[in-house]
Image (spheres, helix red, strand yellow):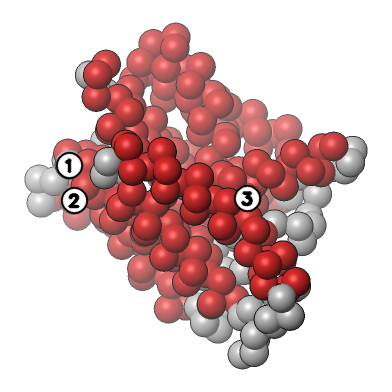
Amino acid sequence: MGGAVGVVVARRLGVPVSASWALATAALAAVGHLDDQHDLPASTRLGAQLATGALLGAWEGGTAGGALGAVGVPAVVNAVNFMDGINGITGCTAVAWGLSAAGLGGVEATQGCLTAGMAAGFLPFNMPRARMFLGDVGSYLFGASMAVTALQAFLRAEDGERVRRLLPAAAPLTLYLADTGTTLVRRARRGEPLFEAHREHAYQRLVSDAGLAHWKVSTAVGLATGAAGLAARDPRVATVALPLLAGSYLASPSVLAGNGLPVNAA
């Protein structure tokens, strides 16, 4: 609802908003809502994500764009969905992501601001004590907004500018994608179901093994996401900073728990 209001207000004020972004985000949020209500099969959810990404990508960039969208949109939407397992983590990440995307200018900046605004409005109800939860509808909405904006920034840019335009929308997703990717690889190697609930993500182990409170982990992830967004301003800096951020984050549960540093979880 907040996203729809934001789009209407932006339109009324003459601020550019992409209709394809609004439609794709709303469509995947609707899929998330149906999943919350009816527990859709994983194949149905993935099929909807693939179709949305492929159609949007083809609209923006032809066959190559469709292929990129079919991979990129499900990857980001599922990463956000998998990572939304403690209070405030996706809200903090979405605020930091939106502020980074706002630096792109044009419709992508509007989409970044709308995403950050929605997340900031939700955070007080979800952190430090949760009175509301995003559910699949919320995680799909934020994931779709991030994925579609990144895809549009890349496909709409001139050939020589594509990496520079992509980075502010993609770099802030480094921690989410790294955590999701490494966790899925570990589970696949052990032959475990990839879509079954578990507690193996780095952010979950920071809570369970290192003893950190939800709000502390979420705040740290949000700050690291913001740092990734700042690094994205210079591709040369990003090539060094992003692997360091991802590696430090992934190692942090073992380092903190191994050093006997459980922290008061209050």
Q: Which mark is residue 187?
A: none
- Label at residue 179: 3
From the image, which quarter does the C terminus lie in? bottom right
Query: Tag 1, which secondary structure?
Result: loop
Does residue 49 appear in this view? Answer: yes
The mark found on residue 105 in the picture is 1
- Locate residue 55, reporting x and y percent: 46, 21
Left/right of residue 183 with respect to residue 96 in the rendered view: right
Q: Residue at x 45, y 46 (%)?
A: 242
Choose mark 2 or mark 1, whichever is in front.
1
Residue at point 73%, 42% (across, down): 184
The reply to whether residue 112 is in sight is no
Q: Nearer the viewer, residue 180 or 40?
A: 180
Q: Earlier in the sequence, mark 2 or mark 1?
A: 2
Residue at the extreme top of the image, as rendered: 63
Q: CA distance from mark 1 to mark 3?
A: 29 Å
Q: Earlier in the sequence, mark 2 or mark 3?
A: 2
Is 258 situated above or below 155?
A: below
Q: Quadrant of the N terminus?
A: bottom left
Q: Which residue is mark 2?
A: 10
User: In which quadrant of the rendered view does residue 235 lie?
Assistant: top left
Q: Residues within 10 Å of mark 1 (few under 14, many from 20)?
A: few
x, y percent for residue 96? 36, 59
Front-lying residue, 68 or 42: 68
Determine the CA span between mark 2 and mark 1. 15 Å
Element carrying mark 3: helix
Name the residue at the left extreme.
14
Q: Nearer the viewer, residue 112 or 205?
A: 205
Q: Nearer the viewer, mark 1 or mark 3?
A: 3
Q: Earlier in the sequence, mark 1 or mark 3?
A: 1
